[in-house]
Amino acid sequence: SPTIMFYSPLLLFLSCVLCVSADGQHSDIKIAGCSDSYGEEMYGLDGEEKAYADFNKQEMIYPLPPFVDPMTVPGAYEQAVANQQSCQQNLKIVPEALILCLMCLCTVAPSVMIYTRDEVEFGENNTLICHVTGFYPAPVNVSWTKNEQKVTGSSINTPYPNKDGSFRQTSRLDFTPQLGDIYRCAVEHLSLTEPLTKIYDVEVHVLCVGPSVFCGVGLTLGLVGVAAGTFFLVKGNECS
């Protein structure tokens, strides 16, 4: 299980431990990092988060699907806090010149996608997903608006590494689709001079699905009508 340590402008000191199973089928990863204003400790398996430390709520979060038995690890949060204290001490030995250099060179802009968890139906509860990937360093900040007004209640996972060394994060917002509503997710990152914004227009997305269904039905009925007309035209000619 190799250990990789590197510096970046926001995760100024970060340690990453990657373990691969004997059969080569699964990969287990742990990330612990910090800056003056940000800290992370996360455990993942096969590209998915198993657990992460929420230093605002002061607890360990286990983002498992509802069909999985709940999992807890006694003392995990306390260990994460101790790791952060050690990380902050390591920050004090990082040369300021190195930090400034990395702030100029080691940034990669994110790409953003916005979509819904389920097929959209007016008045039915759903979840908007703003998926941000390909950025470096971590993290990004994601904010949401509805009809130009800021909304709260969204969630975001901790940064997860991609195979190319960049990161990804996903923000989710529960919503109830209503005709005319327009949602935006705005992504802020060190590489961007202004937020990168993606728009979800409820009306456009619903109507994009509806006409395709109606057009398919209409085309089918039209072909049936043409076939029937041709049949009667031939029969009429035979009778004459």
Image: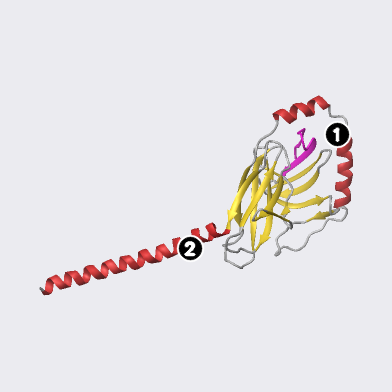
Residue appearing at x 80%, y 35% in the figure: 12
In the rendered view, would you say 9 is above or below 74?
A: above
Mark before the other along the chain sequence, 1 or 2: 1
| Label 1 packing within 10 angstroms: few (<14), some (14-19), many (20+) | some
Please provide the residue range marked out in magenta. Answer: 1-19
Tell me where residue 120 sits by quadrant: bottom right
Q: Look at the image and tell me whether residue 25 can be seen.
A: no
Tell me where residue 22 sits by quadrant: top right
Q: Is residue 18 magenta?
A: yes
In the rendered view, would you say 159 is above or below 210?
A: above
Residue appearing at x 73%, y 49% in the figure: 44
Q: Look at the image and tell me whether residue 127 can be seen.
A: yes
Quadrant location, the N terminus: top right
Residue appearing at x 74%, y 45% in the figure: 29
Residue 194 is situated, as x and y percent measured from the top left of the image, at 67, 39
Query: Along the horizontal axis of the image, is 210 left or right of 179?
Result: left
Residue 143 is situated, as x and y percent measured from the top left of the image, at 70, 50
* Dot label at residue 91: 1
| Label 2 packing within 10 angstroms: few (<14), some (14-19), many (20+) | few
Question: SS of the residue at dot 1?
Answer: helix
Tell me where residue 15 sits by quadrant: top right
Residue hosting label 2: 210
Label 1, label 2: how far apart the Cα atoms are: 55 Å
Residue 131 is situated, as x and y percent measured from the top left of the image, at 64, 49
> For the residue marked with disc 1, what is the amino acid?
Leu
> Which mark is nearer the camera, 1 or 2?
2
Q: Is residue 143 magenta?
A: no
Q: Nearer the viewer, residue 66 or 227?
A: 227
